[in-house]
Image (tube, grey):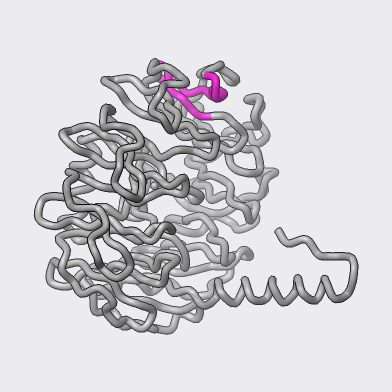
Amino acid sequence: MDKNKKSKKPAFVISSLIGVALLSLLKKGCLSESSKGGTANFDGELTNTLGATGNQEGTASRGESSAKSQLMDRLAVIKNEEKWGYIDHRGTSVIDPQYDYADSFANNGLAVVTIEEKYGYINHKGIFVIDPQFDSAGAFADNGLAAVKIGEKWGYIDHQGNLVIDPKYDFAYTFAEHGLAVVKTREKFGYIDRKGAYAVYPMFDGANEFANNGLAAVKTGKTYGYINQRGIFVVIPKYDNAKSFADNGLAAVKIGEQYGYIDQKGTSVIDPQFDSAHEFADNGLAAVKEGNQWGYIENKGVYVINPKFDYAKTFTNQGLAAVKINNQYGYIDEKGTFVIEPQFDYAFEFAEDGLAVVIVGEKYGYINHKGAYVIDPRFDYAWNFSTFKPELFLNRA
């Protein structure tokens, strides 16, 4: 299966079968169990406006420069010779590879790492702020809490390592932007708030985080529908698969063997006709598959870029999408024109710092939006200078 990277939000809390697959990756040292916040879907498939005066422009420019500086100060996690460490934007080692596993730094400046099968948290200098003591651990969310495993149960700690929510869940995911976290207990999924109180009692066989429109895709039995944050079904379960709502108000759903798109009332907007379908990007385009070829449609289902790729990813805010053709990956613009010719064995989305991770042979490196190497491929693993992406470990097509 091709790795579909969803760059804006983590996607789904997965059903038990997918969970077993991810757990096998964990045992190989590839994935920290909870930091996934559910990044595979149910198929297995997680501006600046300047003012009118010179002073306002100058203030905006300084703000823009400061934002760029903050981006460039970020570190990226890499792996070489079975050990994990961190580099800066020049590719210089800042924290030498020394960990058995390492995750990206969260917004609070802490990153989860593993030493001798115990998980702890370090700062940007590689100093332990929370000593390795957990059996598994996830990244800190913006609300200051991180999921940790103690023995066989999951709970949540604060940035000082204090238990805030006692370990009592069979599985716990990272808190999402809407303030709720998906947890699993007694084989059912529900949602808790930062105090550990149930916002939605565990009753589902699979659960996704809530989209910006306040709806979440959930699985009950063999079908999927959408609930609001009180746990009430807004779109009754009737689909064979369901993906998150995009900001344009449409969600990809599967009926039988075909995908189409519905609105938030469950009304079909684009009839099921595709063999696979991604979420709509901010530019209003969605990658869809017909037969063996991928192309891009607009929100009425009309092709903007005809199917001609072996695989196609979602467009990022830089206006580029990674596509695969003749076994090589490159990047196209919104007209379907190659901006970076196919030349990589795999290509990930561009991050907000303007860099993308690419794979050549078995090595990972970084390119800019012109396709020039900023950091040559030399790592056994590398990820961008922002958020964690566990899909990186799924088999590439």
Q: Which segment is the magenta one?
A: 251-265
Q: Is residue 334 above or below residue 50?
A: above
The C terminus appears in which quarter of the rendering?
A: top left
Q: Is residue 314 above or below residue 65?
A: above
Question: Residue visible at 33% across and 68% down?
Answer: 159
Q: Which of the 4 image quadrants contains residue 360?
A: bottom left
Question: Residue visible at 34% across and 54% down?
Answer: 390
Residue 82 in the image: state x and y as whole percent: 22, 72
Q: Give whichever of 328, 181 is nearer the camera.
A: 181
Q: Give whichever of 196, 245 is nearer the camera.
A: 196
Q: Residue furthest left?
A: 151
Q: Is residue 321 above or below residue 13?
A: below
**Main structural element of the magenta stretch: helix, strand or loop?**
strand
Q: Is residue 232 left or right of residue 294?
A: left
The stretch drawn in magenta includes residue 18: no
Residue 284 in the image: state x and y as whole percent: 65, 38
Q: Give whichever of 220, 361 is nearer the camera.
A: 220
- Does residue 293 show up? no
The stretch drawn in magenta includes residue 254: yes
Question: Residue visible at 65% across and 32% down?
Answer: 298
Q: Is residue 255 above or below residue 166?
A: above
Residue 61 in the image: state x and y as whole percent: 75, 74
Residue 396 in the image: state x and y as whole percent: 36, 49
